[in-house]
Amino acid sequence: GLSARYQLENTPTVEDQQPILPSKEKFYVCDITDENQLSRIIQENQINIIIHLAGLLETDTVEKINHINCYGTKILFDTATKQEHVEMIIYASSGTTVFGYLEIEPYSSLAKNIQPKQLLKKITVNDPPIPPHFDPSFEAYSKSKIYGEELARQYSSIETVNVKFICARFGWISTTDDITSDLYGWSDKSLWCSHRDLCQFIDRVLGKQSILKKFAIYFVCSNNDYCWVDMDNCRQDLNYEPQDGAKWKTT
């Protein structure tokens, strides 16, 4: 298991066989842009906490990214805030919201896999987000996450909305959870987030829900060498302490 709160099980399946889910769990396949279906699922199950992970990555077209990541997020936030029982939304933002800094010194050395000569000044959640510009789809993905954060800020400022919005700027998360390969560059490694640290963050948010502010943004990464984003507010508010980290190999 990755977390003390949840247990992860791998169940082998044959072709066309549906995965076996715990008897008390429900699983829905839903279009995030379908407001009626979203509303029905949230209402019928009296869902009070939503972890919003739905989205398209930078490998899709700009049009699809904008439709799902922007319009879909607007539909979800609008639908959820109309439900009296919804208490909190954890929005999966991204470290790519500040990847534009990798195009300027001194951060650009990481993008070139050149070891910085000194520790880098950390970008905080109060610094302006800067999307990358080297690829249209990557830029669109980054901008969609910036849009989602601003949307969350707007909803949280409405007095009649009692939903808390926690925006998590997750670092780079790999499916294998392995950061040792030389195939990965330091623009990724410096902001890597392990599965264990990801689960720790979610656990911390759920455990401290009652004392959290109505709106917050957190960078969520592991304890990596030359990590250039500031996680101090994550440590202070949530007692988040990353357990893993990518280390620069010296020869």
Image (spheres, rainbow, N blue to C red):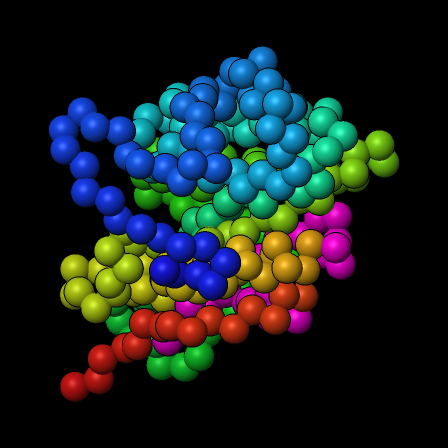
User: Which x, y percent locates residue 48?
Assistant: 66, 38
Quarter of the picture containing the C terminus is: bottom left
Q: Is residue 1 left or right of residue 66?
A: left
Nearer to the camera, 202 or 190: 202
User: Which x, y percent locates residue 186?
Assistant: 29, 65
Q: Is residue 199 left or right of residue 84?
A: left
The residue under the point 73% across, 33% down is 85
Q: Residue furthest left?
A: 15
The residue under the point 61% across, 54% down is 206
The quarter of the picture where residue 28 lies is: top left
User: Which x, y percent locates residue 58?
Assistant: 34, 37
The residue under the point 67% across, 43% down is 88
Quarter of the picture containing the N terminus is: bottom left
Q: Is residue 187 magenta?
A: no
The residue under the point 28% across, 34% down is 19
Q: Which residues are magenta?
A: 210-236
Q: Residue furthest right?
A: 159
Q: How many marks?
A: 0
Q: Residue furthest bottom?
A: 251
Nearer to the camera, 207 or 129: 207
The quarter of the picture where residue 162 lies is: top right
Q: Residue furthest front?
A: 23
Viewer can see residue 167 = yes
Q: Is residue 77 above or below residue 51?
A: above
Q: Is residue 187 above or below residue 62?
A: below
User: Which x, y percent locates residue 230?
Assistant: 55, 67
Nearer to the camera, 31 or 61: 31
Viewer can see residue 187 = no
Nearer to the camera, 10 or 24: 24
Q: Is residue 235 magenta?
A: yes
